[in-house]
Amino acid sequence: MRLVVTNMNLGLWAAAYIKEKISAFAPSPEKPFVLGLPTGGTVVDMYANLRLFYTAGLLNFKNVITFNMDEYAGLPEDHPQSYHSYMRKHLFNEVNLLPENTHILDGQTQDPAAECAAFEAAIARAGGIDLFVGGVGRNGHIAFNEPGSAFNTRTRLVELTPGTRQANARFFFNDESRVPKTALSVGIGTVTDAKEVLFLASGDKKAPAVARVMQPGEDINCPLTALKLHPHATLLTDPQACILLTGKAIEELASQMTQFPEAPHWTLETENL
Ligand code: GLP
């Protein structure tokens, strides 16, 4: 896994990366680009930049198919905090994605197992995900795969930890009791099956998870570490998310930052640590 640390706006960096990937792929109706998408506070800027690229004529979503990682269970689609609402507001209503090309799990389904199986089948029918973009929970969760989730999990109904519900209470009038207790989420295996993954972590609240991923080995209690087993994975962070790095990781990063203070970003490969 590659750690990319930048002083740039992470959302701009990520949006530019996605734009380059889509352009290089040259998607067509016969060969659409399949993009896995996240929600959350970290990626709000990324969506703002994707919208800007679209309005500037630099990015076209006509032949792009999207799959979102997760959705709260029980929330109606039009609930202001549903991920359906989030995606409509931040992307779907603003760009030329075809409605039939966007996929979000139905949190109100009466049959979660069937809903999740259908989602996996739709991903497979689309030819798999070309680039899965994600955020990171404070406890290292990816999508809603909480610590302890097996690395081969698939899309399923999951329970949220008290810590995650507390972290997300800020979107629910700071009232944890309003945060759903369960969600439908792609599995860790669904994420790592993508041809490429790009995860974003910003701020000191994500520093423990970033520090863990930069230590040797994988850890089922930090789902983010599963990305280290992926051949084409990037974790994009700001310097604040790196404040708890230790050992060779911090030595190497500090040396690069001192040597090339004006570089647009600094890169570490976990295999070399
Ligand atoms: C939720 C989402 C995750 C996301 C995480 C981080 O729990 N299910 O996919 O990565 O929030 O969110 P934020 O960016 O708001 O810190």
Image: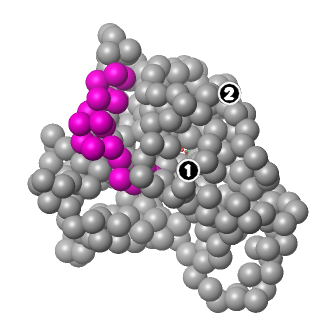
Q: In which quarter of the image is residue 94?
A: bottom left
Q: In which quarter of the image is the N terminus?
A: bottom right
Q: What residue type is labelled 2?
A: Gly
Q: Where is residue 121 in the image (x, y as percent from the top left)?
A: 29, 29
Residue 148 - label = 2
- Quadrant for ligand 1 reads top right
1 or 2: tag closer to the N-terminus? 2
Q: Is residue 123 above or below residue 15?
A: above
Crowding around mark 1 (Cα neighbors within 10 Å: few <14, some 14 to 19, many 20+) is: some
Q: Residue at x 24, y 75 (%)?
A: 58
Q: Is residue 175 left or right of residue 80?
A: right
The magenta stretch spans which residues?
116-133
Q: Which amino acid does label 1 sit on?
A: His
Are discs 1 and 2 less than 8 Å apart at CB?
no
The alpha-carbon separation of the residues under discs 1 and 2 comes to 19 Å
Q: In this view, does 184 lie above or below 244?
A: above
Q: Is residue 113 above or below residue 142?
A: above
Q: Label 1, on which residue?
A: 230
Q: In this view, does 57 lie above or below 164?
A: below
Q: Where is residue 273 in the image (x, y as percent from the top left)?
A: 78, 63
Along the line of sight, the residue nearer the viewer: 127 or 211: 127
Q: Quadrant of residue 265?
A: bottom right
